[in-house]
Amino acid sequence: MTNRPGRLLALAQLANSIGDGAYYVTSALYFTQVAHLAPARVGLGLTLAWGFGSLVGVPLGRLADRRGPRGTAVLLALATAAAIATFLLVSGFVAFVVTASLYAAAQSGLAAARQALLAALVPAEERTGLLARLQSTLNGGLAMGAALGGGALSVGTAAAYRGVLALDALCFLVCALLLLRLPAVKVMTAGAAAGDGRRTAVLGDRPYALLALLNAVLLLRLPLLSLALPLWITERTGAPAWLASGLFVLNTLAVTLFQVRTARAVTGLGSALKVLRRSGLVMLASCAVFALSTGRSAWPAAVIMVVGAALQVVAEMQQSAGSWQLSFGLAPADRMGEYQGFFGTGVTVARTLGPLVVTTLLLGWGASGWLALGLLMVLAAYAMGPVARRAAAGRPMPRPAAEPVPVPVN
């Protein structure tokens, strides 16, 4: 049963990531040039929207636990498509913030519901490997979508940008249809049967909440490729500006090709913590290499940046594999959606605060900022060990996967 759900989850991931890739490279120009919003207002609106998305991730994850992850995931994929389509009608700041908040909320909830759905359909020992394959699929889809978005950028017309939004909405409709083909499941658990009434159990689970916080620190790497490195290259080195896009391609291809292989080393709590510690050290080495590019001329700076980016993507793949294992293995089976929704807020926190943190450290402090960021990553990675062991003390690891109970569909 695992093979078919895995294929459908991968196809759904591919569908929406193609749309996302096209959206990511064109949305800023659409909002500023077509919707006529000031860049500062776009930035403020997106910060408010993702802040809202981080708040509703847990409630939407609980909805997946109570109503079923498949149906919740389908509805949230449709809500994402509707929000993207609504962007075509946005003409003012308030409408933009409302629509962007709907988009961020649907995306955050969809991520939690899909994780809960995967946990219900896939045995525990296979989850990290499947997540690695999904991550590879995600990166491949983003690359394809970015290429399509690049075509729209080369055309540069309002119609081309609107076409990208329409494509993204269509991709999420396809995602919803693929998720609908998955078997409906009902995970029978003691907590659910008892109706214990806890509203936010994950907030009372202090070790797990602290793990999510530490993971958010490690996710501060997210703005590096899209924001920090392009600015660093143009302002602090003599390397050509197009190198930033080359580093993005390097990252995408590496994750597509090697994420599955990296995840094979993670089989339980101990191996996850070992890989996370290693990721912190590799990230420190990456930051130290990036710091060496300060003031260098074109080709020396380019070579240094490529080496730093290669180390960074190795650390990224290791961190992803280790955090997946902890986020699933330490979450109660009956509250998987709620816990995954909370753990996933690390992404929205990194997207919201990360740009400010990394630009302040790197562009404000220069080479010493790179070293400070690397040391912060090492501290967070090593701190996850004692916290994870405390969280696991009352939960056997590895946790056997609960067999999904098919729900008859008339």
Image: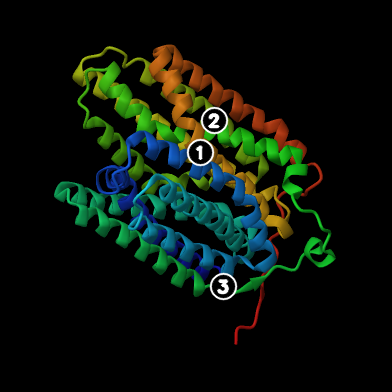
Q: Mark 2 vs mark 1: which is more N-terminal? A: 2
Callout 3: SS = loop
Label 1: few (<14), some or many (≥20) within 10 Å?
Answer: many
Q: Mark 2 vs mark 3: which is more N-terminal? A: 3
Quarter of the image where one finds residue 218: top right
Q: Residue at coordinates 59% horizontally, 36% vertically from top-left?
A: 215
Residue 188 is tagged as: none
**Between 230 and 133, which is closer to the camera in this rendering?**
230
Residue that badge 3 annotates: 1
Residue that badge 2 annotates: 278
Q: Position of residue 96 (x, y in %)?
A: 41, 49
Quarter of the image where one finds residue 208: top right
- Compared to 314, does 362 lie above or below? above
Disc 2 and disc 3: Cα gap in Å? 34 Å
Label 2: few (<14), some or many (≥20) within 10 Å?
Answer: some
Residue 318 is tagged as: 1
Q: Residue at coordinates 26% horizontally, 36% vertically from top-left?
A: 245
